[in-house]
Amino acid sequence: MARDFFAYNLLSIAGVYYIAFKLSPTSPTTIESPPTAESPGLGEKGHLDNGNSSNPRVIVGSYPEVLAEIVQAKSVNDTIGLQEIYDRGVFFFVAKGTPVLVIDESYISAFTVIKVYKVRILAGDYTGDVGWVPDSHVKY
C-alpha cells in the first residue's frame, strides 16, 4: 500500500516536472552559460567524470528525467526507490574516463534546475549507446 502510494506520488511529481520544464520554451530560473574550459559543448568530445574519487563508475540515464528521480531518491535516502529505478533498467554504469560525444542538452528539475547532456558513448562495453548525464560529469 505504502509502496503504491510512493510510486503514484513519484509519477505525479515526475509528470509535473516534465510539463513545467520540458514543455515550456524556457525555464525562468535557468540561466544559459557558455561551456567552460572544463565542460565541452554540443558536438564536442569529452570524457565522463563524476568528481567522486571513491566511485569509479558514472551513472548514465536512458532519458533526462531518470536523473531527477535518482537525485530525489538519493537525497532522501530512499534505497527502495533507488532499487526500483535500477530494476526498471533505465540507467547503466560506465567507467570514469569513458570518452563521449555531446549530442544534445536539456534541463531537469531535482530540487534545483540541472543542465544535462545527451552523450554518445565512444568506448567500452556501451560503445555507440546514448544516454544522459549531468553536464558537470562531462569534462575535456
Image: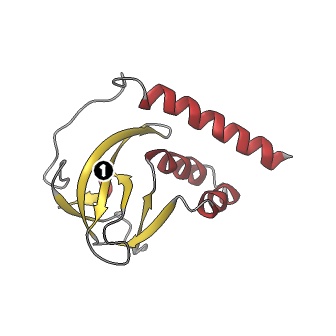
Q: Is residue 78 left or right of residue 63?
A: right
Q: How many numbered marks does the figure carry?
A: 1
**Quadrant (top left/top right/bottom left/bottom right) for the C terminus:** bottom left
Residue sitting at 45 percent across and 56 percent down? 61
Residue located beneath label 1 in the image? 135
Indicate whether 16 appears above or below 6.
Answer: above
Indicate whether 121 appears above or below 112.
Answer: below
**x, y (%) of residue 66?**
51, 50
Which residue extends farthest bottom? 124
**x, y (%) of residue 43?**
16, 52
Which residue extends farthest front? 128
Three-letter code for the amino acid on which mark 1 is drawn: Asp
**x, y (%) of residue 124?**
32, 78
The coloring applied to the image is secondary structure
Q: Is residue 44 left or right of residue 99?
A: left
Nearer to me, 134 or 99: 99
Residue sitting at 25 percent across and 51 percent down? 103
SS class, disc 1: helix
Residue sitting at 59 percent across and 62 percent down? 86
